[in-house]
């Protein structure tokens, strides 16, 4: 095969697949492309275009995807060759050959043709085929321009029996020409295949195949292509580097590249587009089979999440446990946020999500693992659920929550709680106090029948330990549990629109105030109520814990009071289950010694957390139980009462019995009188009689407590405000002490560091001293011929040892002072610590009050937040309405403009109509003038006719006068002569050209003459 570098003369005919012929005397065709076109392109971009054309030709000729082909590499000393084969028949479809010695790279497509229209900018036959890369008809021309502009590489295409040489125009290196010449006759043997076996390599056939050579092709003037450059170019095509299931996962949407060297690289139909931003955040590379580049060969990166989801979704649907695990591992590695799964939470389909969830379930056959989102706590899963936490990224967690049965730890705990077995609560003081407190709150909702059910906690443990000793918990103090349950109950009631059944007073308080009031009542609720027998006859001692009263008394110097009623079990057994007490004007007088029910009561001022009171003069045969609540408050909770008990049972004295009988007789007589005068139920008097019997048996009756009751709510609030200011001052003192403690700690740490440094220096000095002493001893033991020199050395060492001793003494003194200062600082630190502990204890007490106010403020804040949210919603609605109005205004303006245009058009039409009307009026006037002229002419002609007729009439009259004698000849009867007017009519009829004469005689009318001004 030969090719001339000069211009060939003669006619060149290139057959074209469209049936056109290209004839001419010159072989050059100038390409309509400027030298500055695509100035940002490099050689890699140019080769990419040629490679895309090569791949598109294989797809068009053999209707097969490039990713399904087989690629065979053949490496030799003179270069290397890559042949492309059909996956089933192994037929060779094309090749890529690099000749190191000649310095060119050849791309060949078997059984392909190249149309001459390919030299025209913008012509393409691939724009409607999505599986092909070409669309704009520019790639070949731009690639030739860039190759010539950057490296002067020669490009020659062999197709349709001709050589197509893309080169600079002669004497003008700003214009690209295509020189065409027929393949030499001596190369005609290439028209026949060199190898009849279609699976083996053969040289391209100039008439049947298309071959593109780049580098030094047809003369030595072109730049040779180096091996390094060729390898870089070949690396742009994916399937020259990797193939097979071990390196890629193929789907109908694209391929996942598993090769680590290619991670973060994006390919389109096998051709490298470039690295993604932050490629280290991508675990794999990707090749997409669908899509195209824009005119500047850029790719829309915003579509990457959608394309990745399609590829991975197809990987999951096609199955393969290892491939699905690869996808799952990216979601399970929460420390490395892979961008491969970015946006999966909004793009993943339900089927893919369920497949991933089933795969996770298969990995957890024993159910020991718990999959959770990033916001869940591993500690709760381990300690409460007793499972191994396995975190998942939020991208997978959100979609699993949407389509599957995955649960959060709280949801799993709730499900387990609901499905667990029902158990009976233990009959212990702690458990019964808990149940009593919970029912006390629920009793406020009197229209709802609550059923409290306890569930088996299974392996959820509650550990309590103090100094490595088991603790016997009896008093229930966990108010936060009750508050939490109460809040959950209210939430469920509101969610299901259930009527709460609160009293009118509680409804007026509102939800926030009622919650605050209930929490306050829980704090003031008595605990650990116990009933024991006294030392004397008829005595019972009631004791209880009141931590809130002790705190108020110790910190605020306020003595809270408790109301204690000792009920008889025989008459007030139903009051044992009372949980709430409300005080109003019609209720029991707490200051009296006897309650309305006739049972003894007392008001006790609580100055400490431990309280005790003794009831005397009780009937030994009666059983009693105490009911204790906070005194003089609108609403209060009774503490959990103990079982009824009889008082101390000794034989009473005669004096006590006589007093009791006397009192009983007096009360009986009074009762009889009141019964006679009133129609009252006798049973209502029984408690009164028994209460009076108790009063009679009481040796030292209690005096009235009204005088010593001075508790006032307003004074409490004032003292609370005063304590709040004191608490602020204490907080400032605590902060100041904390800062001083921090400074002391810093000073202490500094002294410790200095101490360690000095200790190291002292150790070094001692080592140096020991070393010098050892050296001195060695010098002494050695026998040296020169005693003077030995003595001098000994003196020097002695002086050195003395200096070290002095330095050692100084260091020891500094260390002693440092230790002393450190001890003083330690003492001061301990003092501050003690003061801080005291302040902390006081602050903790005040913090409880602050927490109550904060709770109320938080509720108010929540209410304000709801109002603010509603306001925002209204604002959003108004903004939307404003936007809609603006759109309507804009539409109205548009309509106005349209109407104005229509009006202007109508005005122009009206103007044109007026002009036409004026023109018509002018024409009408002209016609009227012509008509008038015709009428004048007609009148003139009529005058002439009249004159002519008058002359004729006069002539007739003369003739008649001359013949008058002959008319009356005797014996002859003559007809009557015609009237002139009648004769004129007859004559007019004849004169007008009528075909028949009128036999009717009519009188002639004189025509009217119209004269126009």
Image: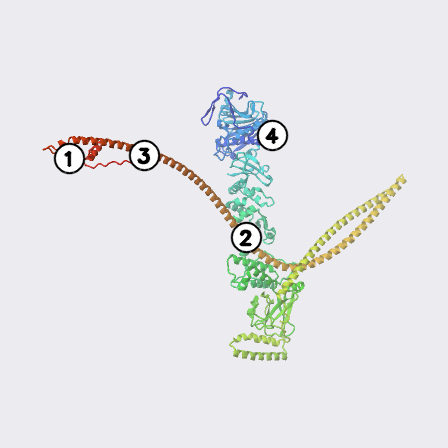
For discs 1 and 4, the disc positioned in front in the rendered view: 1
Q: First in sequence: mark 4 or mark 2?
A: 4
Q: First in sequence: mark 3 or mark 1?
A: 3
- Assign a secondary structure to mark 2: helix
- Assign a secondary structure to mark 1: loop
Task: Please state which of residues 396 and 944 is positioned toward the viewer in this rendering.
Answer: 944
Q: First in sequence: mark 3 or mark 2?
A: 2
Image quarter (top left, top right, bottom left or bottom right) of the C terminus: top left
**Residue 796 spot, x, y in % from top left:** 86, 42
Task: Please state which of residues 65 and 13 is positioned toward the viewer in this rendering.
Answer: 13
Q: CA distance from mark 3 to mark 1?
A: 43 Å
Number of marks? 4
Give the quarter of the image for residue 39.
top right
Q: CA distance from mark 3 to mark 2?
A: 90 Å
Cβ–Cβ under 8 Å for marks 3 and 2: no
Give residue 228's mark. 4
Q: State left or right for residue 1010 relative to residue 501.
A: left
Give residue 869's mark. 2
Report the residue marked by disc 3.
932
Q: First in sequence: mark 1 or mark 4?
A: 4
**Residue 656 spot, x, y in % from top left:** 62, 78
- Mark 4 neighbour class, 10 Å CA radius: few under 14, some 14 to 19, many 20 or more: few
Q: CA distance from mark 1 to mark 4?
A: 142 Å
- Mark 3 neighbour class, 10 Å CA radius: few under 14, some 14 to 19, many 20 or more: some
Give the quarter of the image for residue 721.
bottom right
Q: CA distance from mark 3 to mark 4?
A: 107 Å
Give residue 976's mark. 1
**Residue 753 spot, x, y in % from top left:** 75, 49
Query: Which residue is at a point 57% across and 52% down the rendered structure image?
Result: 409
């Amino acid at each position: 095969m030969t090719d001339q570098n000069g211009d060939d003369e003669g006619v060149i005919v290139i057959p074209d697949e469209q049936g056109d012929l290209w004839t001419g005397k010159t072989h050059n065709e100038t390409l309509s492309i400027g030298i500055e076109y695509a100035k940002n392109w490099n050689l890699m971009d140019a080769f990419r275009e040629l490679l895309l054309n090569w791949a598109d030709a294989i797809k068009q000729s053999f209707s097969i995807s490039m990713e399904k082909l087989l690629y065979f590499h053949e490496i030799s000393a003179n270069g290397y060759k890559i042949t492309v084969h059909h996956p089933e028949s192994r037929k060779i479809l094309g090749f890529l050959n690099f000749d190191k010695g000649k310095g060119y790279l050849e791309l060949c497509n078997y059984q392909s043709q190249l149309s001459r229209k390919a030299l025209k900018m913008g012509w393409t036959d691939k724009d409607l085929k999505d599986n092909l890369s070409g669309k704009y008809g520019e790639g070949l021309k731009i690639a030739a321009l860039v190759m010539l502009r950057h490296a002067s590489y020669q490009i020659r295409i062999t197709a349709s029996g001709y050589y197509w040489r893309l080169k600079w125009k002669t004497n003008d290196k700003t214009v690209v020409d295509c020189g065409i010449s027929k393949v030499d006759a001596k190369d005609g043997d290439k028209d026949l295949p060199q190898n009849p076996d279609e699976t083996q390599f053969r040289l391209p056939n100039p008439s049947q195949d298309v071959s593109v050579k780049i580098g030094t092709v047809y003369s030595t003037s072109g730049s040779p292509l180096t091996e390094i450059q060729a390898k870089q170019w070949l690396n742009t095509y994916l399937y020259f580097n990797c193939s097979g299931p071990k390196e890629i996962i193929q789907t109908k949407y694209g391929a996942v590249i598993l090769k680590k060297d290619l991670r973060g690289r994006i390919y389109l139909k096998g051709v490298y587009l470039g690295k993604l931003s932050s490629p280290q955040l991508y675990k794999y590379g990707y090749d997409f089979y669908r899509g195209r580049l824009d005119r500047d060969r850029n790719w829309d990166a915003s579509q990457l999440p959608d394309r990745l989801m399609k590829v991975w979704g197809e990987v999951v649907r096609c199955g393969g446990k290892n491939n699905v695990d690869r996808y799952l591992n990216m979601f399970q590695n929460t420390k490395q946020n892979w961008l491969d799964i970015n946006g999966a939470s909004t793009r993943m389909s339900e089927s893919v999500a369920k497949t991933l969830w089933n795969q996770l379930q298969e990995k957890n056959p024993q159910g020991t693992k718990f999959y959770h989102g990033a916001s869940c706590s591993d500690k709760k899963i381990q300690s409460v659920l007793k499972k191994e936490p396995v975190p998942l990224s939020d991208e997978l967690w959100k979609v699993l929550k949407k389509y599957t049965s995955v649960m959060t730890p709280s949801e799993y705990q709730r499900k387990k709680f609901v499905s667990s077995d029902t158990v009976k609560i233990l009959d212990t003081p702690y458990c019964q106090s808990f149940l009593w407190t919970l029912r006390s709150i629920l009793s406020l909702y009197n229209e709802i029948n609550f059923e409290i059910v306890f569930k088996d906690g299974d392996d959820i443990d509650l550990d309590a330990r103090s100094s490595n000793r088991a603790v016997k918990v009896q008093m229930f103090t966990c108010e936060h549990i009750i508050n939490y349950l109460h809040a959950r109950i209210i939430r469920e009631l509101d969610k299901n629109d259930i009527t709460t059944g609160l009293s009118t007073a509680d409804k007026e308080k509102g939800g926030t105030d009622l919650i605050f009031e209930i929490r306050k009542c829980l704090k003031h609720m008595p605990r650990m109520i116990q009933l024991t027998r006294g030392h004397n006859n008829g005595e019972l001692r009631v004791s209880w814990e009141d931590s809130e009263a002790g705190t108020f008394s110790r910190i605020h110097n306020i003595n809270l009071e408790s109301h204690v009623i000792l009920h008889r079990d025989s008459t007030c057994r139903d009051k044992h289950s009372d949980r709430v007490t409300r005080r109003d004007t019609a209720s029991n007088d707490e200051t009296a010694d006897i309650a309305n029910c006739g049972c003894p009561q007392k008001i006790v001022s609580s100055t400490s957390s431990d309280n005790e009171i003794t009831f005397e003069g009780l009937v030994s045969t009666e059983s009693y139980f105490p009911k204790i609540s906070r005194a003089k408050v609108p609403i209060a909770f009774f503490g959990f009462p103990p079982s009824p008990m009889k008082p101390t049972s000794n034989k009473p004295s005669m004096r006590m019995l006589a007093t009791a009988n006397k009192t009983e007789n007096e009360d009986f007589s009074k009762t009889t009188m009141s019964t006679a005068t009133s129609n009252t139920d006798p049973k209502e008097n029984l408690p009164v009689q028994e209460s009076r019997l108790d009063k009679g048996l009481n040796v030292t009756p209690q005096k009235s407590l009204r005088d010593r009751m001075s508790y006032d709510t307003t004074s409490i609030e004032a003292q609370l405000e005063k304590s709040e200011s004191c608490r602020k001052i204490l907080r400032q003192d605590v902060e100041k002490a904390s800062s001083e403690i921090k400074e002391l700690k810093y000073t202490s740490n500094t002294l410790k560091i200095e101490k360690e440094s000095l200790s190291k220096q002292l150790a070094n000095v001692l080592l140096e001293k020991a070393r010098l002493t050892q050296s001195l001893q060695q010098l002494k033991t050695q026998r040296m011929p020169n005693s003077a020199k030995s003595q001098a050395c000994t003196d020097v060492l002695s002086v050195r040892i003395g200096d070290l001793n002095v330095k050692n003494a100084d260091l020891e003194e500094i260390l002693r002072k440092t230790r002393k200062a450190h001890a003083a600082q330690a003492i001061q630190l301990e003092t501050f610590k003690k003061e801080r502990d005291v302040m902390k204890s006081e602050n903790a007490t005040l913090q409880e009050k602050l927490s109550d106010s904060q709770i109320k403020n938080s509720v108010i804040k929540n209410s304000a937040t709801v109002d603010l949210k509603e306001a925002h919603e209204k604002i959003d609605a108004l903004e939307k309405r404003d936007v809609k109005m603006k759109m309507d205004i804009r539409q109205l303006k548009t309509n106005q403009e349209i109407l104005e245009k229509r009006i202007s058009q109508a005005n122009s039409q009206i103007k044109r109509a007026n002009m036409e009307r004026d023109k018509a009026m002018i024409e009408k006037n002209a016609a009227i003038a012509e008509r008038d002229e015709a009428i004048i002419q007609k009148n003139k002609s009529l005058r002439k006719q009249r004159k002519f007729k008058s002359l004729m009439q006069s002539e007739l009259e003369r003739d008649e006068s001359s013949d008058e004698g002959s008319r009356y000849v005797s014996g002859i009867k003559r007809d009557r002569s015609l009237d002139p007017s009648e004769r004129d009519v007859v004559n007019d009829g004849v004169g007008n050209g009528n075909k028949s004469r009128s036999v009717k005689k009519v009188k002639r009318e004189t025509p009217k003459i119209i004269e126009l001004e």
